[in-house]
Image: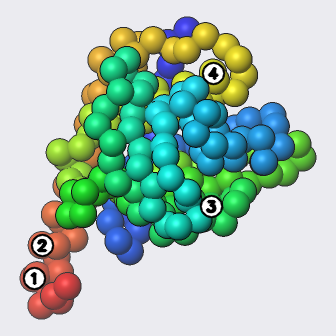
Amino acid sequence: MMPQPTGRLVRKDDGVYLVLDRMFKAPIEEVWAYFSRSPRLAEWLGEYKGTGSTGAVKFRMTVDGEPAEWQDVSIMECTAPHRLHADVGPAGTSHRMFVHLTEASGHTAVTFGRRLRSVVGEADDGPRWDYYLDRLVAAHDRKPMPDWHSYGPVMREHYRTLCRELDRDLRSERLAAARSGITE
């Protein structure tokens, strides 16, 4: 079965976010470990070093085979086991990300968000994050990892369409605001 795109674009006060959800039949603390413990995180995405309680750690992706360069991570909020907000990467070019977990009736919902620096320019991140989060599900469920080639080509147009439509809406709103004399 081919994976389906699950992301959506959400407008927030500080920008547009790519937001995706996953559901686990597991307690919240068990799922939280896949974000907060380096050995668990390494099973699906990458590794980190440092102490999160200091507000800063180093992270690097390992999902694509060869480990990437270490990146700075500024932890802006960490309320275990429910919320993690962080900036990943060098100042000025970092990516704002969040993870929210909620538990009900023995299930944990994970909502992941990543702020886009450019609505149109980062449309290809959608398939990548569907893939990464499906890797999280596979790691948790002890199933085989998904194949990247089932994601990029198949999902790319879905995310590009979402981004083009939102970009068109944003342009229309700016034009309407300019015509009515409203400035940002």
Q: Is residue 162 visible to us here?
A: no
| Residue in front for this viewpoint, 123 or 170 | 123
**Element class at badge 2:** helix
Q: Earlier in the sequence, mark 3 or mark 4?
A: 3
Label 3 environment density (alpha carbons within 10 Å; few <14, some 14–19, many ≥20): some
Which mark is drawn over residue 175?
2
Q: Where residue 152 is drawn, which disc sits there? A: none
Marks 3 and 4 sit apart, C-alpha to C-alpha, by 22 Å
| Residue at (55, 14) in percent of width and height | 145
Label 4 secondary element: helix
The way the protein has been coloured in the rendering is rainbow
- Where 13 falls versus 24 (above or below)? below
Determine the secondary structure under disc 3: strand
Looking at the image, tell me whether mark 3 or mark 1 is earlier in sequence order: 3
Residue 122: horizontal and vertical position, in percent? 24, 43
Please identify the quarter of the rendering in which residue 65 is found.
top left
Q: Quadrant of the C terminus?
A: bottom left
What is the spatial separation of the Cα atoms under label 3 and label 1, in whole angstroms?
40 Å
Q: Is residue 100 above or below residue 48?
A: below
The residue identified by callout 3 is 83
On screen, residue 8 above or below 143: below
Residue at horizontal 54 percent and vertical 31 percent from the top: 42
- Separation of marks 2 and 3 at Cα, in angstroms: 36 Å
Separation (CA) of disc 2 from disc 1: 6 Å
Q: Earlier in the sequence, mark 2 or mark 3?
A: 3
Q: Position of residue 140 (x, y in %)?
A: 69, 27
Depth check: 118 or 63 in front?
63
**Marks 3 and 1: which is nearer the front?**
3
Question: CB of mark 2 within 8 Å of CB of mark 1?
Answer: yes
Amino acid type at image mark 1: Arg
Q: Which residue type carries mark 4?
A: Ala
